[in-house]
Image (tube, rainbow, N blue to C red):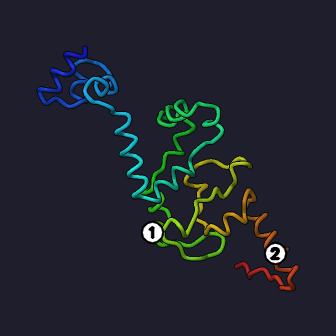
Amino acid sequence: MKDKIIELRAQGQTYSQIQKILGCSKSTISYHCGKNQKNKTRIRTKKFRNSNPLARKIDHFKRDYKIMFANRLSNFHRKGTRKNSKYEKRNFNYKDLINKFGLETKCYLTGRYVHLLDATTYELDHMIPKSRGGENTLDNCGIACPVANQAKRNMNVFEFLKLCEEVLKNFGYKIEQPDQK
């Protein structure tokens, strides 16, 4: 198999073409054709994440630590790529986030302006905390300034607002609900 793969590759065939001809997986072809492919991919991915802070934040947002600590990360990634999987809705990228919020947006808690390419001005927040059953989906993702996100911790938005109201009342502020139309 190895000799046939190398011969076809020398003839200028692509991995997809070799896969069709021999009926083997692309990883098998890569294994025989490339040297240190896994390391090259890891370096390429790391370089992209370092050049794109939004991609790094999304990766951190979607990470499922329970699975990682149970040494099942490779299994998680396999499930995440399967069609009709319960993990499929987790598959969003920085382009999806930009389409939803735009590059210039506001913190959903404070209203402060943030720019998605300036990673120091915001954090991605689970609006329904993971500890309360929230998922790693685009619908559950909110853009929050770091101070507000850290103050919110594992509260939902309504609990956080109640806490803010208590703090303001403690310092003598009067709280009025806005007119609802």
Q: Quadrant of residue 30?
A: top left
The three-letter code of the residue at mark 1 reads Leu
Q: Position of residue 12 (x, y in %)?
A: 13, 30
Number of marks present in the image shown: 2
Using the image, tell me which numbered label, if any, was put on residue 103: 1
Q: Is residue 162 above or below residue 125?
A: below
**Which secondary structure, mark 1?**
loop
Q: Residue at x 53, y 67 (%)?
A: 120
Circles 1, 2 touching at the beta carbon (< 8 Å): no
From this viewpoint, which residue is outermost toward the left?
11
Q: Is residue 28 above or below residue 116?
A: above
Q: Residue at x 72, y 66 (%)?
A: 151
**In what element is the residue under mark 2?**
helix
42 horizontally vs 159: left or right? left
Mark 2 surroundings within 10 Å by alpha-carbon count, few (fewer than 14), some (14 through 19), many (20 or more): some
Q: Given the current orientation, which residue lies at the most extreme top position? A: 1
Query: Residue visible at 27% across and 30% down?
Result: 34
Quadrant containing the C terminus in the rendered view: bottom right
Mark-to-mark CA distance, 1 and 2: 31 Å
Amino acid found under the numbered disc labelled 2: Glu
- The answer to which quarter of the image holds residue 111 is bottom right
Mark 1: few, some, or many residues within 10 Å (few <14, many ≥20)?
some
Based on the displayed image, in which of its 4 quarters is residue 69 positioned? Answer: top right
Q: Is residue 123 left or right of residue 163?
A: left
Q: Position of residue 52 (x, y in %)?
A: 42, 58
- Which image quarter is the N terminus in? top left
Q: Which mark is residue 60?
A: none
Which percent across, then down, holds residue 148?
A: 68, 69
Which residue is denoted by mark 2 in the rendering? 165
